[in-house]
Image (cartoon, grey):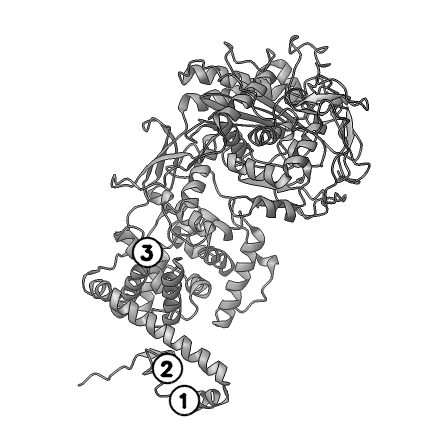
């Protein structure tokens, strides 16, 4: 018996694979008769494009298609590689730091007859509701994906369940390659699957292979991980939960985003209803919440320790660089990267030094929880204090030590934005020197100064009413202060004026060029609070859209300790920026090394600028609480942000100590574990950057420079470049009024949250200076401070009306 001829189907139905217009239905003929000439032209153009793409794909992919059909074997679930955990190593490449992945128990192959029909249809409803009637390949979806891949370079995933399993089979046999030829190959394998196996068999393959998140591969493993039961015991509602996470396990897991998970669950049940497989009213009251996921499962270790945050940063970096995935979006790339690391048996060598990491953890613990006095401090704060430490190698961008907290599965304080206060002033200072403003230039040194571009009374105040007159007085009786002294005393007035003179967008761009990739507007200028990615948003746009004011210059807007550490590393490297990174080497389970992107470097400012900057910041580190032991040249800047609260209490909410030696840059932050709130020292007084953050910084750096074998190096001598008359005022001239800015400063509060619960913080004030007393640090009378150390009430009450 002869075989009937099957005509290929194209855009216009059977016989029109290339869109040549043959033969049409009567309805289609009537529709085209009514088309306008413009619509007809557009349709013909679309047909020509599709035809061209089809020809191109056929010509370039014919070898792939033929080879796939005749030589590719379909991998069955029991033949799929056993998931292998990936190991993360310290920088020596030998000492294991953590392991991510599943043990052998995370895949259990079961026969399709053991899977209840309700479970089967839940997956079909969620992923491919025409599975039992389609040909195994979504032709339109495949062509659309191929078109996107060819024209835009981004790749798209499989569509039908058969195609999804074909992809899983191909991924098991070849390296990841989401090019259009691989997509064609998968489509051919899907056709082969559909010809060789029944729909029931294919569904069984898929159910045993697909990833459900939480390290679970296959429906049986998923049932055990999510509900601790056999698949035979799953209810329809529970099966719908599992089916709903397949599309995106990283986000559709109810433990990650309950609302999103429930929306997917409702969708799945609606699709089951359409298929006639679910007959109950759909209600969230019946949503079966799964058990909470475990931090460490199977072969994993080190994830619930401080090193767990390093693992997270490695995943983020590999996803951002598309090292193990070339997905078109970062979110998808991260999910694919995490999945491959959980199962691929990779070996990742990180930049983290074991001794430095141990020093960071020990220093944080010693100061925060070590002595009785420190326990008293935690008691004053009801054990709400949190700290972060990041240490970066200047000139290379290698993150040498990273501490975001003790529980690596919790909230990473080193990756969370916090208000940097006066520690951010270094960027304004460096840009000023670069632009020819001398460190000996003169500025208004009065305790307070009014600026026309600010709301309220327009005044900026210095902490403790500090004033500076090392430059003398002008003809009107205003104190004159050198830029150097203003930095040492951390005068807010001077840095507001300096930022105004330089341009706030220019200051932000300079900070970004140094290493600040994320900044958060706080809503204080009437704009919604927003987190800006400066790698995709220009500084000028961030300033405009976020309503950032000249308060930027003294640290009102939150940045992450990780970014801040790399910014200080740029300063330490003589103005040479290097992309901060955590990964130095990746090899797969076969020992093949994965190519990593090259670290980017750029020279931000000259050696002369660097020499003058070092000289100024070296003067900040002038007391025993900050000096590395044994002493050596070091540059520092503290930062403290006042807590803006409705009761008007005298308290601070963020405290920093940042600094560097030529070979190592480190920042330390202390604040609240959750949200924004007051932080106190052991006596119940406001905490400052010159206290606990400085203690941690000193202890860590004193240990690290020894353990890393970093001999003392001196900073180059200052050149005192730039113009002394380029400041706010000249020594022989009266102090002019600050120039008016067109940027209004309305009051307001942030309207949405972009970080942890309790955020945004109040728009308080930088309330500290860098200096500290030289008396015993545990002496309760040693809190009156010296000039500018900030051990007193914050003076610059810049919180908008009603801020809390």
Q: Position of residue 99 (x, y in %)?
A: 38, 35
Asked whether the residues under the numbered discs 2 and 1 touch, taking CB atoms below 8 Å apart as contact, a structural biologist would say yes
Helix or strand or loop: what does disc 1 sit on? loop
Numbered tag placed on residue 13 in the rendering: 2
> Which residue is rendered at x = 46% and y = 26% of the image?
573
Pointer 2 or 1: first along the chain: 2
> Which residue is rendered at x = 81% and y = 22% of the image?
477
Res 533 → quadrant: top right
Left or right of 741 on screen, residue 220: left
Q: Between marks 3 and 2, how big is the CA–CA gap?
A: 31 Å
Numbered tag placed on residue 25 in the rendering: 1
Disc 3: which residue: 168
Pointer 3 or 2: first along the chain: 2
> Which residue is rendered at x = 43% and y = 63% of the image?
127
Q: Front-most of 469 and 520?
A: 469
Helix or strand or loop: what does disc 2 sit on? strand
Numbered disc in front, either 3 or 1:
1
The answer to whether residue 44 is above or below residue 459 is below
Q: Front-most of 617 and 229?
A: 617
Left or right of 301 on screen, residue 251: right
The answer to whether residue 615 is above or below residue 178 is above
Q: Front-most of 501 and 198?
A: 501
Image quarter of the C terminus: top right
Res 347 → quadrant: top left
């Amino acid at each position: 018996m002869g075989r009937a001829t099957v005509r290929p189907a194209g855009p216009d139905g059977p016989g029109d694979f290339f869109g040549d217009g043959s033969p049409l239905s009567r309805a289609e003929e009537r529709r085209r008769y009514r088309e306008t000439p413009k619509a007809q032209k557009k349709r013909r153009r679309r047909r020509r494009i599709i035809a061209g793409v089809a020809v191109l794909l056929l010509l370039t992919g014919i070898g792939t298609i033929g080879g796939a059909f005749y030589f590719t074997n379909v991998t069955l679930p029991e033949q799929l590689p056993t998931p292998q955990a990936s190991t993360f190593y310290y920088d020596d490449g030998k000492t294991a730091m953590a392991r991510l992945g599943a043990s052998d128990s995370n895949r259990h192959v079961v026969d399709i007859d053991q899977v209840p029909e309700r479970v089967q249809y839940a997956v079909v409803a969620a992923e491919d509701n025409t599975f039992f009637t389609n040909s195994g390949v979504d032709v339109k979806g495949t062509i659309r994906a191929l078109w996107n891949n060819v024209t835009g370079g981004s790749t798209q995933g499989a569509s039908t369940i058969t195609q999804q399993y074909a992809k899983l089979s191909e991924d098991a046999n070849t390296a990841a390659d989401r090019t259009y030829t691989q997509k064609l190959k998968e489509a051919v394998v899907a056709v082969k699957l559909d010809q060789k196996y029944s729909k029931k068999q294919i569904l069984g393959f898929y159910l045993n292979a697909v990833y459900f998140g939480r390290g679970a591969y296959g429906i049986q493993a998923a049932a055990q991980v999510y509900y601790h039961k056999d698949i035979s015991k799953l209810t329809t509602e529970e099966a719908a939960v599992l089916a709903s996470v397949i599309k995106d396990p990283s986000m559709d897991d109810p433990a990650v985003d309950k609302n999103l998970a429930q929306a997917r669950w409702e969708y799945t049940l609606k699709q089951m209803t359409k298929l006639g497989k679910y007959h109950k009213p759909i209600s969230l009251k019946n949503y079966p919440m799964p058990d909470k996921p475990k931090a460490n499962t199977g072969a994993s270790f080190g994830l619930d320790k401080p090193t767990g945050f390093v693992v997270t940063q490695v995943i983020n970096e590999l996803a951002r660089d598309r090292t193990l995935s070339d997905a078109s979006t970062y979110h998808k790339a991260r999910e694919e990267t995490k999945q491959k690391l959980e199962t691929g048996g990779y070996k990742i060598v990180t930049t983290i030094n074991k001794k430095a990491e141990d020093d960071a953890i020990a220093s944080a613990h010693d100061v925060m929880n070590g002595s009785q006095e420190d326990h008293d401090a935690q008691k004053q704060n009801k054990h709400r204090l949190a700290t972060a430490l990041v240490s970066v190698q200047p000139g290379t961008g290698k993150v040498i030590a990273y501490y975001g907290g003790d529980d690596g599965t919790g909230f990473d304080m080193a990756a969370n934005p916090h208000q940097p206060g006066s520690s951010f002033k270094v960027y304004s200072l460096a840009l000023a020197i670069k632009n020819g403003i001398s460190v000996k230039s003169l500025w208004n040194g009065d305790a307070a100064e009014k600026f026309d571009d600010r709301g309220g009374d327009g005044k900026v105040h210095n902490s403790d009413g500090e004033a500076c007159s090392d430059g003398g007085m002008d003809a009107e009786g205003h104190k004159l202060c050198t830029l150097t002294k203003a930095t040492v005393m951390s005068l807010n007035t001077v840095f507001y004026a300096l930022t105004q003179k330089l341009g706030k967008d220019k200051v932000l761009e300079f900070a970004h060029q140094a290493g600040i990739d994320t900044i958060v507007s706080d809503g204080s200028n009437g704009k919604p609070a927003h987190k800006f990615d400066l790698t995709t948003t220009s500084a000028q746009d961030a300033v405009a859209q976020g309503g950032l004011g000249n308060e930027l210059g003294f640290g009102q807007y939150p940045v992450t300790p990780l970014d801040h550490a790399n910014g200080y590393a740029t300063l330490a490297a003589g103005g040479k920026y290097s992309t901060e990174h955590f990964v130095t080497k990746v090899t797969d389970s076969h020992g093949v090394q994965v190519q990593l992107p090259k670290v980017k470097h750029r020279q931000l400012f000259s050696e002369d600028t660097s020499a003058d900057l070092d000289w100024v910041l070296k003067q900040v580190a002038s007391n025993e609480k900050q000096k590395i032991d044994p002493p050596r040249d070091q540059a520092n800047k503290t930062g403290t942000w006042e807590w803006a609260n409705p009761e008007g209490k005298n308290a601070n909410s963020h405290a920093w100590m940042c600094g560097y030696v030529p070979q190592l840059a480190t920042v330390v932050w202390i604040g609240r574990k959750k949200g924004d709130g007051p932080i106190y020292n052991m006596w119940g007084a406001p905490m400052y950057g010159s206290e606990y953050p400085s203690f941690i910084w000193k202890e860590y750096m004193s240990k690290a420079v020894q353990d890393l074998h970093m001999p003392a190096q001196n900073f180059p001598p200052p050149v005192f470049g730039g113009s002394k008359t380029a400041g706010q005022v000249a020594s022989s001239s009266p102090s002019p009024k600050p120039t008016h800015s067109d940027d209004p400063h309305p009051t307001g509060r942030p309207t949405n949250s972009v970080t942890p619960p309790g955020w945004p913080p109040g728009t308080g004030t930088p309330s500290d200076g860098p200096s500290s007393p030289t008396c015993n640090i545990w002496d309760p009378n040693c809190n009156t401070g010296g000039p500018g150390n900030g051990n007193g009430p914050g003076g610059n009450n810049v919180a908008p009306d009603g801020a809390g």
